[in-house]
Each structure stands twice: as C-alpha cells, then as structure tokens.
Image: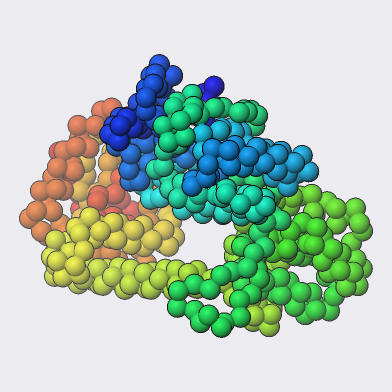
Amino acid sequence: MFFRTLFHDDRNSSYALATCIDGTWRESMHKHSHLSFIGAPSNGSLYVSVNGFSGDRRRLDSLRQINALFFDLDCHGSSRSQTDNAISNALEIISEAVRIEKLPRPTLTIDSGRGLHLYYVLNRSIPYRCSANGPVNEKALGLFRLVQQKLSRALSHLMEPIDCIGVDEKVFDFTRVSRVPGSYNPAAQRYARLLSSSGSYYDLSDLNVRLGGFAKHVVSPEVGHSPNAIVSKKRGDDSPLLRSRLANVISLQALRNFDCEGSRELMCFVFYNTAVQLVGPNDASRQLCSFNSRFTQPLSQAELDSVVRSVDRVVNVRGQRGYYVLSAKRIVEILALTEQEKIKIQFHTSTRSIIREKAKEATASRRASRDKKISNLYRSGDFTQNEIAQRVGCSLRTVASVLSRARRQHFSSLPKLQIEVPFVMQQRKGIILCSISQSHLQNEKLLQMRLTTNRTFTFSRPSSIATWPNHDLQNTHNRKKEGSFNKQHEIKSNKILGNYAIFCHTCLSVVRLVPLYSFNSSWVV
C-alpha cells in the first residue's frame, strides 16, 4: 500500500533503499516493482527515498522525479509517554484542521515511532530537469518550494500548543529518505505504522490556492540587514511588476477619458488577471467592480462574472490555476496600446526584453553589413568565393547562401518577356550555348538553356543597371563545374519532357527581344 501510493506515478526511476543495523548503514538502488519483495530487517531500521533517481546513487545531480511533499513532525528528546501524548494530540489537531478546511488531508499518515510522517503525494510527479541532461526545472521547483513553505508554516502554527513536537525542516532535502512503515525503530523500540491512507493526490497549483491564507507572513531580517530595520508584511507571491501593471491599466482608463467602448471587457480582463495574483480572487473581484464603475458605460454584472470565470478556471503554462501568464508584448496587443499611450502611462517592458530586442537589432545590422560586403566583393570580379569567405571571416557556405539570395532578389525584380523557340530547333535536343553580342551591351553575356520541343519560354528582361557578373565562367574551377553541370543535364535530358529553359548556375539575365536567327549559336553537345 505504502509503495504503491507513494510511487503511483513512477517514471522508471530507481529508489534508494537503506538499512541501518547496529550503526552500519547500507544502501542500494531498486526499481519500484522490486521494492515490495524486499523484507525489512528485524533488528534494524529500513528507509526509502521519497523521490526517484536516474543513476545508481542517491545524489541531487541524478534526481529524476519528485513524488510528494514530505513532513516530519518530530518528538526527539521526549519520554515514551510524552511522545505518545504528543502524537495523539497532533492527530486530533490535524483531523480538526482538515475538517474545517484549514489544512488539506494528507495522502499518507505514518506513526514513525517518535513522531508523525505526513505525505502529500502529487497527482503527477515533477521532473527535476526540463529534459534528459537538460537544465533544472526551476519554475516547477519554485512552485514546489512555495507550497512546501506554506504547508510547513501551517503545520508549525497548528503544532504550537504542543510543547515537544515540531516540523523538522531538514527533511526538505530532495534526496532525503524516510522510514518505511512496518519496519522497526530501534531508538523508539517500536514499529512504524501506517495510520491512514486517504487516496487523495494533489496538484501543486490547487494546494497553492488552498493554502493562500498562510501566504501572509512576517519576513524576518536576513544576514546583512539592520536588526532595527522595519520589516514589512507582504504576500509571498507579491511582485512590483504586477503592481506596476495594475497601475498602468488604471492610468490607461483615465487617459482614454473613461470612455473605452470596444475595449472595456479586455481592460477588465487584464485588471482582474493582474489583481488576482496580488490579493486573491475575493479582493480582486471587489476591486474589479470598483474599476468597472469608473467607465462612462460600465459593463453589466453578467459580463464581469464572465471575465472572472474565464480567469479563475484557467491552468497556465506553469501548471498554476487561476490566472494567465501575460507577457508585456501580449498586454500591448490586448489593450491595443499606441506608442504615445505607452509613454504617457509609463508602460515598460521587462529589462530582459529590451536587451533582447537591442541584441536582435545589432545582429541584423551586422548581418546586413556582412551581406553587402560579400555582394560588393563578388561584383568586383577580383575574388573567388573562397577568397571572399577568408576576407569577410565567414564560411564558404555562408558566402554561397548570401550570393544565392542576392541572385534571387535581383531577378525577381526584373520584368518578364516571352520569346518563341522556332520549329526548326525542335529536331535536336541538347544544350545550346548562345553568345549574344549587342552594341548597347558593354560585355558579351552568356545564356544557357535546354531545348526539348516547340514551346514558349519565359526569360528575364535585362535591367538598365549592371547585370549580375559572369566572371565565374572565366575561372578554371568554375568552368569545370559548368562542364559537370552541362553533363548532368545531358544525362537527364531524355528523362524529362516539356522542360522550360534552365539558366546556368550563374543565373545571367541577358536575353533581349531580338530574332533568334541573329544569335550566333554553336552546339556544345
């Protein structure tokens, strides 16, 4: 029963099983399915890790999953009769707190022999890491620690009337082991017993909401603070950013002269979603009614209730219930804030977002400067792509990618012209190299095309500016590539029917509207 309940959401983890006999500690790792078949020693203690591990040792860096919130109500230093009375009184107090809904009912309650062990088993275990060998799942662990602190404060408050019992916070270590019910406790000279199993499993978000009343606490002075400093009371999940967002919405309402037709519901949504994180649902609802009453034409109560329900029932990306996680960018979109409004209400995005945007702009500027330098060097005709890569300080693949993108942009901007292939040329298939000499062209340009049948082809009309250079054809290495290109298309020519004209890899744009018989043509295959 104990293992099956505690490890109900096992993810193929290993669990530490430890024995302590005559002061000798022995520990081994086992799968969940094997634990039930291991017997407890008759003259020593038996412990099991609350959480699961991925390796063969019980270490934090190999922790895989977190299964439960574990609390040890310890009675060390007391006589047997005092311990029995303390345990009995603690059980009565906990039972009454559960009855009046001041405390969630523990999933497992165990008499350890010298105190009580309480387990709040999670419905879904928490992965310690976001992925295998990835970063630690800080968001989920932060919520886990928050709920753990709230439950610890609640239990400590309930146990105050009992002198010899208290919450042992040393067991908050994720690698901690706990005593197995049914095993012997030599120090107390009695066996640990399973007192109750409620069968209830919990979500952290639900526990966080239910324990909201214990969130208010006095923050004690920390190291480095003056002992005479004034210590304020505040919620554990309070945030200056949330208060700033709330003030922004109120300022926006006044800036728009309280006549916000078309955006009242969205403004109420943002207001309530922010307020509920600061003061809870009850106070947030009252503040929402006050905020709504300031509109020239307030929303009806039914519309306000709809806003509240839409927020209260959501489970956000952090696994928490009762509010949406809205980024500054998303709030700007919802409220349709203009630049002038953002300045007037002092709506600022987070520092991290500003830094990220500036970094993106700087990267785009550097990339544009690099691409321009690559294009200019290539157009000069004095450098090969390898030489350009060395001068610019990038890879050859980057140079090729930049030039390919520049060619596409160049030809996409040119107007199109249709010419007809004469019937006499359909009798011969192959690659034709057409040399075009025109008085208005400064240099002789080359065009390569494949002819398969009598069709209409679409080519690019040359622009008035200098066309893309063809100096690659003058390079020996590139001429070899050109020959390989021609041979490749010659092999495939009999397999592909109805092909349109194919430009060579230099993508020259030099075709003019002139009769084909004026071309000086020569067969190359």
Of residues 151 and 185, the one drawn nearer to the viewer in this rendering: 185
What color scheme is it? rainbow
Q: Is residue 484 left or right of residue 34?
A: left
Count numbered badges in the picture. 0
Question: Looking at this rendering, what residue extends furthest in the left direction?
Answer: 476
Q: Residue at x 41, y 58 (%)?
A: 412
| Rendered location of residue 191, percent (x, y) | 49, 27
Q: Quadrant of residue 297?
A: bottom right
| Rendered location of residue 98, percent (x, y) | 72, 40
Instruction: In the rendered view, tell whether residue 167 sits above or below residue 489.
Output: below
| Rendered location of residue 142, percent (x, y) | 51, 54
| Rendered location of residue 164, percent (x, y) | 57, 49
Q: Residue at x 71, y 66 (%)?
A: 335
Q: Quadrant of the C terminus?
A: top left
Q: Quadrant of residue 451?
A: top left
Q: Residue at x 80, y 62 (%)?
A: 283
Q: Is residue 216 left or right of residue 250?
A: left
Of residues 76 and 212, the one drawn nearer to the viewer in this rendering: 76
**Does any portion of residue 131 appear in the rendered image?**
no
